[in-house]
Each structure stands twice: as structure tokens, then as C-alpha cells.
Image: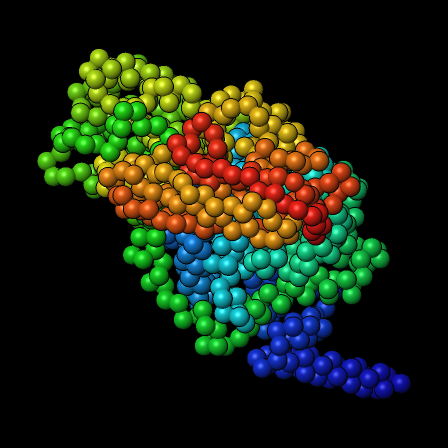
Amino acid sequence: MRFSKKLLLYIFVFIGKGNISMAQTVYDNQDVSFEERARKIISVMTLEEKISQMVNDAVAIPRLGIPEYNWWNECLHGLARAGKATVFPQSIGLGATFDTDLVYRIADAISDEARAFYIHASKRGNRGLYTGLTFYSPNINIYRDPRWGRGQETYGEDPYLTSLLGTAFVKGLQGNDGKYLKTAACAKHYAAHSGPEELRHSFDAVVDFRDMHETYLPAFKALVKDANVRSVMGAYNRTNGEACCASKYLLVDVLKKKWGFNGFLTSDCGALVDIYKYHKLCETDEEAAAMAAKAGMNLNCGSLYSYALIKAVRKGMVTEKEIDELLYPLMLTRFQLGLFDDEEKVPYNNIDISVVDSKKHKDLAYEAALKSCVLLENKNNVLPFCKELNYLYLTGPNANNADALIGNYFGVSDKLTTFLEGFVNRVPAGVSIQYKQGVMIDKSNTNPIDWTTGEGAKADAVIACIGLTWLLEGEEGEAIASAQRGDMIDNSVPKAQIDFLVTLKKKLASQNKPLIVIVSGGCPVQLNLIREIADALILAWYPGEAGGNAIADIVLGNANPSGRTPVTFVKSLKQLPDFEDYSMKNRTYRYMTEEPLYPFGYGLSYSNFEYDELYVPDKAKAGEEIVVGVTVSNTSCIAGEEVVQLYLTDDDASVPVPVRQLAAFKRVFLNPGESKRMSLTIPVEKFSLITDKNRRKIESGYFTISVGGGQPVSKTKSYVTKKILLKGDKELEL
């Protein structure tokens, strides 16, 4: 009897090893589909092994030839937190470019650098945090309120602009091989997530159906349906009572059933703990794990799944078959990235490490910085400097501050060019440059003696570089100089800087010397007083490693500014609802009725552009694409690039709709005196609305179409408008 048991044990072990061997043959067989290989590799894992692969720091399984892998990587505006990389402008600056092709090329460059770094890191056995090919980027949340510290990570307040730029970014990251992914992108934070940072782990964003589908969801839908984004990240907060990382409505009903999402879901980092600890939606860790798993949360960025999910399985809250289905898209993604294939079979593995911060990528960073800068004021055409300057004076806390270039979620470069360094690089030989910081960035000077403002008055012109850094605004825990955990509750530049500018202006005014103010930062700060003080005012955002050269070239006239505001600059926070109110009423240009300080889509140029010969059909059938024609002319003697913007207003809507909305845009370069005929196509969906019965529908009636260098408001120098009549109602899918 003893002998027979031993024999049976040997037989069992032999058969088990044989099954693993056969399965391994299949998932190692590179002629078999990724789908089959993923299923086979899961079939030979134990329950414990399966769950070990469902957290961001997935451990190695040596017996199956599975190396460790960390899913958590960042590349918002360049390969981040991994070492040397090209530092492109922060996302809000990329939003200011209104340039989808540029954003695609930037993402393509980032993914090249990511591949090159991964190849070298893995060869060294470095498979830890920030070394992988799956990225928690882009952030496509809507920048609904200027007080949110993480708004800098977004493309701005407009869902359509965000959709197009986000789609371009994802396509650039993931590549176009057809079989292999270059990297895997992630759309975050799904869905209604834009502050406050201090409450993000417990907050419930209450959003009605119309706002959800007109504002908060369109960009996510676009990235799923138009870009096939491989991953979606659930937010920390609740939305309408459900934890975003365990929401049946958001994750199952909308994302998977309506949009057909077939990638993997990941939680924000540590968010699953919030389900029971702060949201109080259940009492135990295993209940939280089960809630997330049942809603389809494949990957836990964090550790809850590693200890609580197996408890949930053993208690019958989740089945092992459900674990298999959750693990499948994760393993599939690793196969699609080529992580189990011969190196030479994966086309992206031939990318050389020399691409990292290469000249090509540096040039791209410069182009992006140039296109992102927004000229807000230019009194008496003080810029570009027309007369010979012999003495420039740079001052302000951000003049020689690298933190003013990078924003949050940044990489590092040995070519970070500050504003001071940019002017030193660009001024002609023989021009004197002097620099003094003049004022602390976030507090009054300890030393009351002021030499800076008096000496500045001796210069031909003064350039004051002020504003914010990622230490003053950003994410909870990172903005260490913020008392509001990264949020900008008062939405202002620190008072010490304003006081310094006031004093400086008084000294310069007596000498009739111009004051050029450069503002860094990621949020639309209050600029009421600053615009009065400045002779010229430029938004630099966080312009990346080439920011100093770009700003210097704009000021000195070597380049023409062309950026446009991707957010509304309000006159006062009193124009806005409460920060915690997620209703879109009186928010962003689409719903505000009060006049802002600077509208969405605004920006000056050294050139003058005129619009005429607008062609819009008098009538059309609902559901047809509308092509609009317009002639744009450069009537100045300076070559420049214009951002042509088309806005649409539903004049006969039966329900509340946006005041107007961006429906098309294009960049166009025009030489002095040159005219070009432009065509812009309005997507069918832009004519639709959300009915009181929660349906998306195009209604018969008149629409006003406006085309110009901005919205049809007083600040826009030239625009043309015309009405079109749509006939027939048409229902569209949400």
C-alpha cells in the first residue's frame, strides 16, 4: 500500500511536469498567436502565481521562464523618473500648441527613448520601478478648475482638443507595427477626476449625465475607439457614489460594453485601499479586492491584490476562472510588447541608445517649446526688440531656475537651458547681460536691501521671470512648498513676486524702460495686476529643456510666438463655482457667461492675420460631415504661424448646451502678404446634444459657425461667421 501511494505520487508529478512542458512549448512558440500563448501560460500557473502578476511589481516565476516586471512607468512629457531623457514641454504646454502632428512626433520620440532604455536596463538585470514599457500616460482629465494643482498634466479644458491630442500621443507611444506594441499607453484618470488633491482619496464627484457625456467622458471614448489605447487607469475618487476603481457603470457598462474596450484596467497607485479605508464602501481588504475584481480591475498599482485577492478567492467572493480572465489582458500585453520573443523578431529592439536626448529630439523639444509659448500682451508692439540693445537685465526667481522648465513627472537632461542661459546663448556678441534673482520664489526676502530694481533701471530692457514651479503646484506629496497639497487655492503668483514687480515697474517707468514679464507654471494664474505692470507678457508654461532658447528667440525676434491658451484665464475666482462642485455650469469657455481675462484659444502674434471668404453650406442633412472653407491672409511684413479655430454654436437647442465649442482647428504658416484657402471638417458628433432622456441626438435647427484666430469674442482680431440649417433629426450612440 505504501509502495502504490509512492508510485502514484511519481506518476502525478511526471504528468504535471509534462503538462507544464507542453504548455511552455506553446507559449514559447513564436509562430502561435499572442492570444493562445497568453492563455497557455496562464493555464500552468498556480493561483498564487497568477495573483503575483496582477500587481505593478510582478515577481519573477523562474520555473515558467517569466522574469519580474514592473508595470509602473511615466512619460507624460518625456521618459520620466528613469534617468537621462529628452524633456519636452509639460502637457499643458503641449495643449497650447494646438498641434496634433507635433504631439504625435513627441510621443514617437518618447517611445523610442523608452525602448532604448528598456533594452539596456533589462540586459543589466534592472527590472525595477520605471524600467518597463507600460506607461501611465497620457492624463486626459478635463482641466475644469484652475485651482487643481495637477491641471498642468492635462491638455487643457476642452474635450475635443484633449481627445485629438491624447489620440495622437497614444498612437505615437504604441507604434504602428501592426503586430508588436512599441510601448503601451494608459488613459488616466477615469473618469471625473480634477481635484481637490487633499480630498482625492475620499471625495465623491457628483456629475449629471449630460456633463458626464459632454465633458468628462469624450476624451476617454476617443482614446479607446480611435487610438486603441492599451490601458485605462481608474481614479482615486468616487464618481456618483461608486469608487472609480470598482465602478460597474464606468468600467463595465460604459468602457467595456458601450465602447468595446479590450485592454487592461489598472488602479491608480494605492487606490484599492481607499475603497474600504476612506470611501467606506466595504469593511475589509478582501471585500475591496473582490469589488475591484468583479468590476474588471486587472492590475493593482499597489499591493492590496497581493494579499487580499487570494483571501477573496478562498472565501468564494471571486472564482479562479475570474482571476484567469483578469490576468489574460495583462499577459497578452506582455506578449504584444515582445517581452517573451527573440530580440531580433521585435522590430523596436533595434532602437539604439543614442536616440536618448539626441540632436533630433532636442530640436523637437525646441520646436515644441516655441509653439507652446503664448504672447498675452504686447503693448505698443514692444516685442520683438526692434532697436539695438546693449544692456539686458534678467531678474526674478525663475530666471535661472531649472524647476521652472520641467513641471512634474519629469525626466532629466544635461541640456536644461534656463531663461538666463537662453539669452546668453542668443544675444549678439558685445551685448551686456546682468542677472540678479531679486526676490525669493514663495516668500519675502529675509534681507531687506534691494539693489536689483535700481540696477535694472540702468538697462535698455528688463526681463522678469516669475511664476510657479512644481514645488508650488502639482500632486499630493510632491508639491512640497504648497500648504494645499499641490492645489492652487488662491490661484495667484506668490505675493512677494508681485510686490517685487510693482517696485521694479516704478523704477523703470521713470526711465521709460520696457518690462518684459515671463510667467512659468501650469495653471491659469490670476494676471490682472501683472498684465497692467508688464509691457509684454509671455506664458512659458513649463517649456522643457529648450525653454530658455525658445523664450530668448521670441523676445529677440528670432521666432514668432504662436501658442494659444488651452484654458480660460478668469478675472477672479468669484467667477467660478466652488472647487468641489463638478457641475460644468459657469466653468470653462464652453459654459461661462461672464467675460474672462483671457479666453480659451487666445494668443498674440507678431504677424497680423485676416479672415474672409467663409464658405458654409446654407443647409445640410443631419448626420452629414460639414466641410467649411475660409481664406486666411498674413497682412503684415512678418512671417508667422496661425492657429485657425472653428467654433460651433447650437442656436435652436431644446436643452442646455455649450455657449460654443471648438469643432475644428489647423495650424498654417504664412509668409508676409501670403493668403491660403483652408478647409476644415466638422465631425458629425459636434452637432449633437444630450437630451433630457439621456440620448445623444442631432436636432433640426440653425447652427452658427465661426472661424478665426480665436473665439468670436472682442479679443479676437479677425473672425468670420455664418449660419447653417440642419434638417432632420438623427440619433447617435453615446
Residue 312 in the figure: left or right of residue 172: right
Numbered-mark total: 0
Q: Quadrant of residue 309?
A: bottom right
Question: Measured from the top left, where is residue 272 in percent x and y?
Answer: 69, 46
Residue sitting at the far front: 618
Is residue 245 in view? no
At 23% from the left and 36% from the top, the residue drawn is 556
**What is the x, y in percent for residue 462?**
24, 25
Residue that extends furthest to the right in the rendered view of this protein:
1
The residue lying toward the viewer, choosing from 94 and 324, is 94
| Residue in front for this viewpoint, 688 or 723 | 723
In the picture, residue 316 is in which quadrant? bottom right
Residue 420 found in image quarter: top left
Q: Residue 512: x, y in percent?
A: 21, 17
- In the displayed structure, 537 sits above or below 503; it is below
Colour theme = rainbow
Residue 727 appears in the picture as rendered: yes
Q: Residue at x 39, y 67 (%)?
A: 351
Picture residue at 71% right of the left edge, 61% below the top: 326
Q: Position of residue 260 (x, y in %)?
A: 68, 59
The quadrant of the rendering that contains the N terminus is: bottom right
Question: Measuring 55% from the left and 39% from the top, which residue is drawn there?
Answer: 723
